Image (cartoon, grey):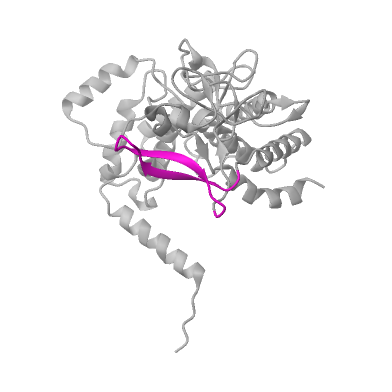
Amino acid sequence: MKIIFNAGLVVFFFISNIQIILSQTPISNLSWQYVATRMPDEWYGSEESKSVAENVLLYQRDFGGWPKNIPIHKPLTDAEKAKINDDKGLNDAIFDNSATTTEMKFLVRMYNKTKNEAYKDSFNRGLKFILDAQYDNGGWPMFFPLRKGYYTHITFNDNAIVNILEMLRDIGANKQLYSSIVHPEFFSRSKTAYNKGIDCILKTQIRVNDKPTVWCAQHDEKTLLPAGARTYELPSFSGAESVGIIKLLMEISDPSPEIIVSVQGAIEWLDSHRIKNTRWDFFTNNAGQRDRRIIQDPKAGDMWARFYDLETGQPFVCDRDGIKKKSLEEIGYERRNGYSWYTDAPQEVFEKYPEWKAKWIK
């Protein structure tokens, strides 16, 4: 008997089985981001999804956005609903951690299935919130209305601006997902906001000897220079937040010469700042705690630091005292294990780059 192995077919069945398992899993056991955008298409518009939608409408702040890190899809008691309703005036509407854009992506799926005008109105309030929050220079803060502190910086952290620009791009292009929900007056505004956002990305890109490199997780909203956030998030070259920006630029269908140079410079910088043959190692420390470190391993792939020193280009980590250290062993247990200091995310852009380069760099 001859057995024919079809890898593509195996992958298809594997993914299909995973989707079936997840579709049968109670939504309270899933993440809000998964429920908002990745449930089976037929689920949106179901009675269960309508209950979730009521929560989404309830959590929307008076300013038009939503707070972050809330499992919006989980059932609420009457007391909880009353408290959320009382909180509608809070100034905690935010773009960080995929907040606001995630709720809007859910609402558009619900509207396309139900044509419920409440979903359409809520989505457009969110879109107006995004458009009103944009700085004249094209960037976005973390919160709107503005809150004092590092929250006013142009926020690339956790793909906040990338998420916004991807949505505005698709709205401006009149993609089918958004074509029936967006109020007519917001189409042209979305196009303009998207173009300004791309221009802001080009203007904030860190240049060394006039050569474009990568970006910081946040940039000063006035000077556009790299800026700090929390005490352990110092101004730096970012090996993590730059990835989403590069991918966004690479997806532009007709890039300008400036965008081509920007992508090429960022890729070259990441390529020269690999931490080669490195991986995470999890172990039990002398105190009996689960701990982690990075180690050299000739069989491992490459990693990148989240932060690189702006003067030396060397990777660093940092504790809550704000003092740069070279290794994880030099900072405390809490920050060592409670933050994403290293990543292999840039590998994704290197996989896409050859095709992009062949197309645009002659």
Q: Nearer the viewer, residue 274 or 168?
A: 274
Residues shaded magenta: 276-299
Residue 258 counted in the magenta span: no
Q: Position of residue 290 (x, y in %)?
A: 33, 40
Q: Is residue 124 visible?
A: no
Residue 136, by quadrant, is top right
Residue nearest the viewer, comparing 206 with 360:
206
Q: Give left or right: position of 105 versus 186.
A: left
Residue closest to the eye, 62 or 134? 134
The quarter of the image holding the N terminus is bottom left
Q: Position of residue 315 (x, y in %)?
A: 59, 31
- Image check: 292 left or right of 345? left
Q: Seen in the image, is 87 located left or right of residue 249?
A: left
Q: Residue furthest right?
A: 362
Horizontal placement of 84 versus 127: left or right? left
Q: Residue at x 44, y 31 (%)?
A: 97
